[in-house]
Structures are given as structure tokens and as C-alpha cells.
């Protein structure tokens, strides 16, 4: 009896071994496309797969097929999980197509076609490319962001960790941790310039951690290996003291409701911005002015917007205001501005303090200043700014500072816009928001190797066309 029991046990073990062995050794069918499923669906997220005429609301676990498209509204966001383990984060106001997702050379090859907005990639297996109107960004491991900026007609590529690349018909550029590139979108038949290299800013790393939870554990270690990040405040002795807001319309009855003026907001989560209705308004434009003067603009037909505060990653004080627009998109009433604050996130408090100084360094020189090249022009995107900035301690970053004054000399807008380093020069073609008849004052801001902020002399021109 005991002998028979041992025989039965042996047969059972052999059967299990053969069964599991067959399951392990049988390869996946390479002709079958790999899976891509949506999860963490929040707000307005729409999906349309091949064979479907219209978009429909995306549900948790929805399968995105090759050729399928996903788009998010102002309050929408989602996570796309590939079968390789790679995660793609989709923030608000983004649209993309899953152009390819199939086995290739014993791995998974995925291609996304970005139509609008931005996507964040945390690659854990296979390879992934992001196709844009300006060129292609690729990641070989492991964290990439691609943003299609319609205002400047540029594609911003950020490599937060690992090895990435950016390419277009004019050339290609290999990127590693802390490096980025700018791809220029040109008209049909035109040849674009090669990808422009740039260094990632501190704000970009903050935005990475805010939008990609998988990055939170990586950030302190990565930042520790990089040079401290600069900050800059655009000031110039020959221009008046400015606040980065637009002057409200006198007598405008448009009132801001929430968040309350001076509100202390959390470091993350959704926030409802609301205001009263205005007679004659076809739509409304919400502007949130960042600490460095950058203006984040959102439009809606309603009187409220639900935004994620993570999209404003830096800690400190922000201002915001709302404009009522007519059917032609012209401002008919602009509200007064409110402010709000947001704190440091938990991971920020563990980072080493930023070493900075407000004392100008007399060894910083601005030479061969050019800008706006090609002006006057009816085409805002043809206004290029160039400068050579030298310092014995090196230059870490540079910006274009600006102030816009109306025909009466009243300051109405101001801020700073980043420049990129290319072929020994700091260059850029940022669009300064100004209307015909306005005077635009502009200057360069640089942060040297000791983190001193230095400004150039101030230049100006009179606006003759409308820049968005």
C-alpha cells in the first residue's frame, strides 16, 4: 500500500511538472498585438478604437487597440498600462493615438502619436517612441516627457532618467538624465533646424514628480547627482517694479469666487476655480501666473474649471484672474486678480537647499545681443532672440524677461520665458503676449555658476501684430 501511494504521488508530481513546464516554455504568439489598458481614469477621458465612429467615455480597464485614440478634457487624466510593464501618464487637455504596440525582436515596441498636450512615460520594458509634428522622441530607459506647445510651435522633450533621444529630418540628439531637447515645427516642405539641446530646470523635475508617482522615489537620488538648479527673478534697473498680472478692466463686474483670495491650497489634488457669469461673454479665459512670471492659460464656456494643482509644481504664491471674451476672442472684461499659496511637497523637504545669491557678478557679460530677429513681422513665431553670455564661473541657465505696456505707458503684463543653449549661444523664439500699439520691453536674465542672477540692459519695440 505504501509503495502504491509513492507511485501515485510520483505520477502526480510528473504530471504537474509537465503541465507547468509546457506553460512556461510555450512562447507568446508574436502575431498577436500586446495589451494597452486604461486605469486611474479621472474626469473627462474619451476613447475611440478602430471601427468606432465617435468617441465615448473611457471606463476603468478599457482596452486601447492599435490605431485607437485617447483624449482628455481640462479635468481629465488617465494611466495607460502596457503589457511590458511600461506606464504612460496622460494629463489634462491631451490627445494621442496608439500607432503601434506589437512584439519586435523579443521585446515590445510601442509608438504613440501625440496630437495635443503632453505625455509622461515610465519605461520598464521594451522600447517606446513618441511621434509629433516636430519629430520623434524615443526612450530606451526609463523616464521621458514630451510636450507639444501650440503657442510656440515647438516640441519639448525631457529626459528625466536613463537614455532618450530626439530626432527630426535635420538630425538626431542623444539625451541622458537631466537633458532635454526642443524640436521645431515647420510648414510642409520646409526643413526644420536640428534638435536643440537644453538642460532641464528645477521646475521640470518638480512637475515630473507631481505627474508621475513612480518618480517620487527616484527624484532625491537623481537630484543629488545633478548640479543644484537655478531660479531667476526678472528685474531691471531701468524698468518699474512689476507684478506678473494683467491690469483689470475698469468697472468690470466679473468677480472671482473660488478659491478665496489668499487661500492656502494643498500640494496636490483638484481645485475648482470659479467666477460669476458676465453678460455678452462667449467664453472665459482663466490665467494662472506662476512664481517665475509664466502665464498658464485655460479657456472654457462655463464659469468654473477643475484643475489639478500638481500642474503648478513650485511652492510659493501664485496669482490668477479671469477674462470674458467675445465671439471673436477679444477681451471685453478682465477681473481683478486673486492670489493663492501652495506648500512644499513631502519629497521636496528632503532635498538639499538651493544655493543661490542675489548679488550680481561683475564678470558676467552679454554680447552679440540680437532680437527680435526678423522683426517687424506679422508672424510671431519668426521673432528669434539670441545672446552670448559669458562668465568665469559659467552660465547655468538663461531667460528672456519682458514687460508689456499699453499706449498710455501702463504696465499690463510681465514675466520670464526660458531660453535654450545651442552652438555657444542662448536662443529662443518665445511669444510675448502683446497687442498692436503696446510697447514691449525685453532683456536677458542669466544665472551664473555661483547662482548669481544677472540682467542685461533693457531693449524695446512697438507691437504691430497680435501674438497669442
Image (spheres, rainbow, N blue to C red):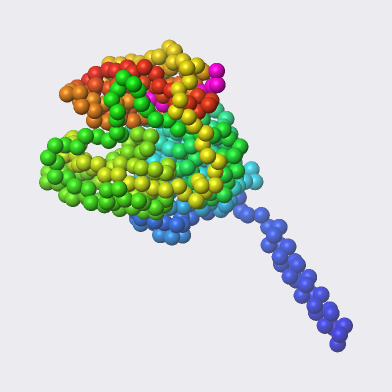
Question: Which one is nearer the viewer's eye here, 173 or 439?
Answer: 439
Question: Which one is nearer the viewer's eye here, 92 or 456?
Answer: 456
Q: In the figure, is residue 3 to the left or right of 33? A: right
Which SS type dominates the magenta stretch? Answer: strand
> Going by the picture, which residue comes out furthest to the front?
359
For image coordinates 29% across by 33% down, the residue present is 243
Question: Relative to residue 423, is residue 21 depicted above or below?
Answer: below
Specify whether residue 341 is in view. Answer: yes
Q: Position of residue 198 (x, y in %)?
A: 50, 28
Question: Relative to residue 175, is residue 37 depicted above or below?
Answer: below
Q: Quadrant of residue 319?
A: top left
Total tally of numbered discs in the picture = 0
For image coordinates 39% across by 52% down, the residue present is 266
> Going by the picture, which residue comes out furthest to the right?
3
Figure quadrant of the N terminus: bottom right
Q: Position of residue 92 (x, y in %)?
A: 37, 47
Q: In the figure, is residue 197 to the left or right of 75? A: right
Q: In the figure, is residue 468 to the left or right of 19? A: left
For image coordinates 40% across by 36% down, the residue present is 148
Q: Is residue 400 magenta?
A: yes
> Going by the picture, which residue comes out furthest to the bottom?
1
Q: Is residue 204 magenta?
A: no
Specify whether residue 129 is in view. Answer: no
Figure quadrant of the C terminus: top left
Q: Position of residue 223 (x, y in %)?
A: 56, 39
Q: Position of residue 301 (x, y in %)?
A: 22, 47
Residue numbers of the magenta segment: 392-401
For image coordinates 42% across by 50% down, the residue present is 267
Amino acid at each position: 500500500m505504501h509503495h502504491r501511494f509513492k507511485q501515485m504521488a510520483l505520477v502526480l508530481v510528473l504530471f504537474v511538472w509537465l503541465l507547468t513546464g509546457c506553460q512556461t516554455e510555450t512562447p507568446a504568439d508574436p502575431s498577436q498585438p500586446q495589451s494597452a489598458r486604461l486605469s486611474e481614469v479621472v474626469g473627462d477621458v474619451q476613447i475611440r478604437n478602430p471601427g468606432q465612429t465617435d468617441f465615448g467615455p473611457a471606463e476603468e480597464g478599457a482596452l486601447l487597440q492599435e490605431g485607437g485614440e485617447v483624449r482628455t478634457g481640462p479635468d481629465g487624466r488617465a494611466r495607460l498600462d502596457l503589457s511590458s510593464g511600461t506606464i504612460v501618464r496622460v494629463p489634462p487637455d491631451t490627445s494621442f493615438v496608439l500607432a503601434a504596440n506589437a512584439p519586435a525582436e523579443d521585446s515590445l515596441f510601442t509608438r504613440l502619436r501625440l496630437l495635443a498636450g503632453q505625455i509622461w512615460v515610465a519605461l520598464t520594458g521594451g522600447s517606446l517612441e513618441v511621434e509629433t509634428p516636430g519629430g520623434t522622441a524615443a526612450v530606451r530607459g526609463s523616464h521621458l516627457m514630451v510636450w507639444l506647445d501650440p503657442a510656440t510651435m515647438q516640441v519639448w522633450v525631457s529626459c528625466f532618467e536613463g537614455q532618450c533621444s530626439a530626432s527630426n529630418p535635420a538630425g538626431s540628439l542623444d539625451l541622458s538624465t537631466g537633458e532635454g531637447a526642443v524640436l521645431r515645427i515647420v510648414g510642409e516642405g520646409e526643413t526644420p533646424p536640428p534638435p536643440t539641446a537644453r538642460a532641464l530646470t528645477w521646475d521640470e523635475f518638480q512637475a515630473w514628480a507631481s505627474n508621475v508617482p513612480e518618480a517620487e522615489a527616484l527624484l532625491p537620488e537623481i537630484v543629488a547627482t545633478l548640479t543644484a538648479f537655478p531660479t531667476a527673478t526678472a528685474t531691471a534697473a531701468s524698468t518699474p517694479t512689476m507684478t506678473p498680472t494683467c491690469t483689470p478692466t475698469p468697472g468690470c463686474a466679473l468677480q472671482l469666487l473660488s478659491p478665496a483670495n489668499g487661500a492656502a491650497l494643498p500640494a496636490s489634488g483638484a481645485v475648482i476655480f470659479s467666477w460669476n457669469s458676465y453678460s455678452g461673454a462667449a467664453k472665459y479665459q482663466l490665467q494662472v501666473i506662476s512664481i517665475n512670471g509664466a502665464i498658464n492659460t485655460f479657456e472654457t464656456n462655463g464659469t468654473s474649471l477643475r484643475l489639478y494643482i500638481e500642474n503648478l509644481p513650485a511652492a510659493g504664491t501664485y496669482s490668477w484672474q479671469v477674462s470674458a471674451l467675445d465671439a471673436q476672442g477679444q477681451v471685453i472684461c478682465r477681473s481683478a486678480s486673486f492670489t493663492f499659496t501652495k506648500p512644499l511637497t513631502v519629497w521636496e523637504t528632503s532635498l538639499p537647499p538651493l544655493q543661490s545669491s542675489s548679488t550680481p557678478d561683475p564678470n558676467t557679460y552679454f554680447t552679440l545681443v540680437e532680437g527680435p530677429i526678423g522683426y517687424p513681422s506679422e508672424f510671431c513665431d519668426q521673432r528669434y532672440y539670441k545672446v552670448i553670455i559669458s562668465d568665469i564661473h559659467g552660465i547655468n541657465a538663461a531667460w528672456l524677461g519682458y514687460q508689456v505696456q499699453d499706449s498710455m505707458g501702463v504696465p499690463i503684463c510681465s514675466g520670464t520665458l526660458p531660453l535654450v543653449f545651442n552652438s555657444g549661444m542662448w536662443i529662443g523664439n518665445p511669444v510675448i503676449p502683446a497687442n498692436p500699439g503696446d510697447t514691449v520691453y525685453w532683456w536677458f536674465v542669466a544665472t551664473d555658476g555661483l547662482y548669481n542672477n544677472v540682467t542685461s540692459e533693457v531693449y524695446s519695440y512697438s507691437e504691430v501684430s497680435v501674438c497669442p
